[in-house]
């Protein structure tokens, strides 16, 4: 529920940003300044660090005394904070260089104004990495103790801070500088998110004392696990950032179109993929610590079934409702019909890869829970290389939508390699009933897709409708599609017990 609330507020946030700032060179500059620390956060804190930290933390919690657990938390916190502080300082000082690397197209075009604006905002947003990474550290502790609600609620604060910055701080920034308020909102959000979790760590008596000790046994184990995971676990985020680099060579607005379509794709990915990944890693780590391979396989099997049952219809619905969704949420005087059409193209391309994005978040923990970070990195390298090939092949005919499609295709390759690796090693074997699951899925998706394809009005009608009418119609179609999907599957035998967690 907290994850759902965060995603709904994320929708509100993007609606406010699109209607106030639109899609132009200034918003492109902000999204670059926001994506760089956000990318490092997902790659480092929620990606490599989380997948290395949670299994080791679970082992300490299960097999060692509380004093050892507390010392481990203190040493990891101190070492992590020291590294983050150094990285953040470098990012602030070298902001123009960093922006030039991640938006090289602006350098080639000689757009000094856009580079300067992005650099100014990056100096405000880069320290977000320090605070949000420590927030992810705190969330890992809470998740390992079965307290999922607080970390799931924390992202709400980012959305609230950005909405507040857009509505109240931006008008105070002066003509043409309102977008800088969003960078201040990001910084404020990072501080608020870390502060919010501290009382809940206090309840567990695990508020860390920052005592750097890189040579601590547990810290060294995490570092060994992190190095390959730095690349493997966040290959999707690396691909999205490469999209930004290449999009900087395209027409103005391309980065914004990719951002808004990615954000819409992130809604089901966050509700389904992040939620499943957050829950499944501690469970798999516990099963591994208990030496229960049968329960380990059953947990993975449940995760895969949940991914397909919810992820495939979400992808189909997102693709078929891409235009109405973007029109309803973002169409305004500054986000034009042309912007809607461009964002629709990349959203359809991203939606095709949604099941693969979710599968990666479920399959990768099958390796990380066993403290195997080397195998996924080989698959990630292959997927990364394939993504670059897809990018170069698709960017010319499809422009920014080609970049989104390349990301989706490489995600399927990554997910497929992860799945086959688990099968080859004998770690996962499908449980009984998969043939029935596929029958339910095919019937439900065909019924739902047919309803949307035949029933939804042409996009021009959505453009002409009033805002409230569009919103009500969109909610109605989403509700009807979900009802048809699940009623069809239930008529064929799906029951609640089939969806219960392992």
Image: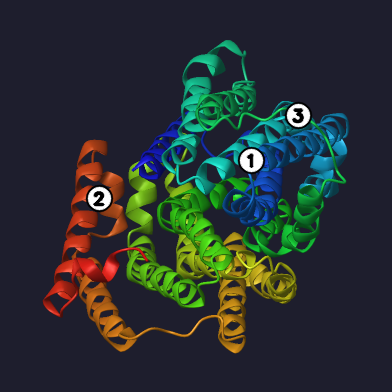
Provide the residue designation for mark 1.
137
Which color scheme does this rendered protein use?
Answer: rainbow
Q: Secondary structure at mark 1?
A: helix
Q: Residues within 10 Å of mark 2 (few under 14, many from 20)?
A: some
* Sequence-first disc among 2 and 3: 3
Q: Residues within 10 Å of mark 3 (few under 14, many from 20)?
A: some
Q: Is residue 499 visible?
A: yes
Vertical placement of residue 93 versus 487, above or below = above
Q: Nearer the viewer, mark 1 or mark 2?
A: 1
Q: Quadrant of residue 97?
A: top right
* Sequence-first disc among 3 and 1: 1
Which of the labelled discs sits on residue 210, or is there none? 3
Q: Secondary structure at mark 2?
A: helix
Provide the residue designation for mark 2.
474
Residues at badges 2 and 3 in contact (C-beta under 8 Å)?
Answer: no
x%, y% of residue 375?
A: 71, 75
């Amino acid at each position: 529920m907290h994850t759902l609330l965060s995603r709904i507020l994320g929708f509100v946030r993007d609606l406010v940003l699109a209607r106030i700032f639109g899609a132009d060179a200034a918003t492109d500059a902000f999204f670059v300044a926001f994506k760089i620390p956000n990318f490092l956060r997902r790659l480092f804190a929620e990606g490599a660090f989380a997948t290395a930290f949670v299994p080791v933390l679970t082992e300490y919690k299960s097999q060692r005394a509380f004093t050892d657990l507390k010392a481990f938390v203190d040493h990891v916190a101190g070492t992590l904070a020291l590294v983050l502080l150094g990285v953040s300082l470098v990012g602030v000082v070298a902001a123009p260089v960093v922006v030039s690397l991640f938006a090289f197209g602006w350098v080639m075009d000689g757009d000094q104004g856009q580079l300067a604006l992005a650099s100014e905002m990056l100096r405000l947003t880069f320290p977000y990495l320090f605070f949000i990474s420590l927030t992810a550290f705190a969330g890992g502790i809470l998740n390992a103790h079965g307290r999922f609600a607080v970390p799931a609620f924390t992202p709400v604060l980012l959305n609230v801070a950005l909405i507040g910055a857009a509505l109240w701080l931006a008008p105070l920034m002066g003509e043409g500088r309102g977008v800088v308020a969003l960078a201040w909102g990001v910084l404020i959000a990072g501080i608020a998110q870390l502060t919010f979790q501290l009382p809940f760590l206090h309840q567990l008596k695990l508020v860390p004392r920052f005592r750097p000790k890189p040579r601590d046994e547990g810290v060294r184990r995490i570092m060994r696990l992190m190095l390959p995971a730095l690349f493997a676990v966040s290959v999707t985020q690396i691909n999205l950032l490469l999209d930004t680099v290449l999009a900087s060579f395209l027409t103005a607005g391309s980065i914004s179109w990719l951002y808004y379509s990615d954000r819409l794709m992130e809604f089901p990915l966050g509700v389904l993929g992040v939620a499943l990944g957050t829950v499944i890693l501690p469970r798999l780590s516990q099963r591994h610590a208990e030496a229960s391979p049968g329960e380990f396989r059953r947990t993975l099997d449940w995760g895969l079934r949940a991914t397909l049952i919810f992820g495939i219809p979400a992808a189909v619905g997102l693709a078929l409702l891409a235009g109405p969704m973007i029109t309803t949420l973002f169409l305004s005087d500054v986000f034009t019909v042309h912007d809607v059409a461009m964002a629709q193209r990349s959203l359809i391309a991203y939606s095709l890869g949604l099941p693969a994005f979710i599968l990666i978040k479920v399959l990768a923990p099958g390796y990380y829970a066993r403290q195997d970070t080397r195998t996924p990195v080989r698959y990630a390298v292959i997927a990364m290389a394939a993504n670059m090939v897809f990018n170069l092949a698709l960017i010319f005919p499809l422009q920014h939508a080609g970049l989104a499609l390349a990301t989706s295709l490489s995600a399927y390759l990554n997910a497929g390699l992860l799945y086959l690796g688990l099968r080859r090693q004998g770690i996962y074997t499908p449980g009984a009933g998969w043939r029935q699951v596929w029958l339910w899925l095919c019937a439900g998706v065909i019924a739902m897709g047919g309803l949307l394809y035949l029933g939804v009005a042409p996009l021009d009608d959505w453009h002409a409708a009033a805002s409230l009418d569009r919103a009500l119609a969109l909610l109605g179609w989403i509700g009807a599609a979900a009802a048809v999907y699940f009623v069809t599957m239930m008529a064929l035998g799906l029951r609640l017990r089939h969806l219960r967690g392992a």
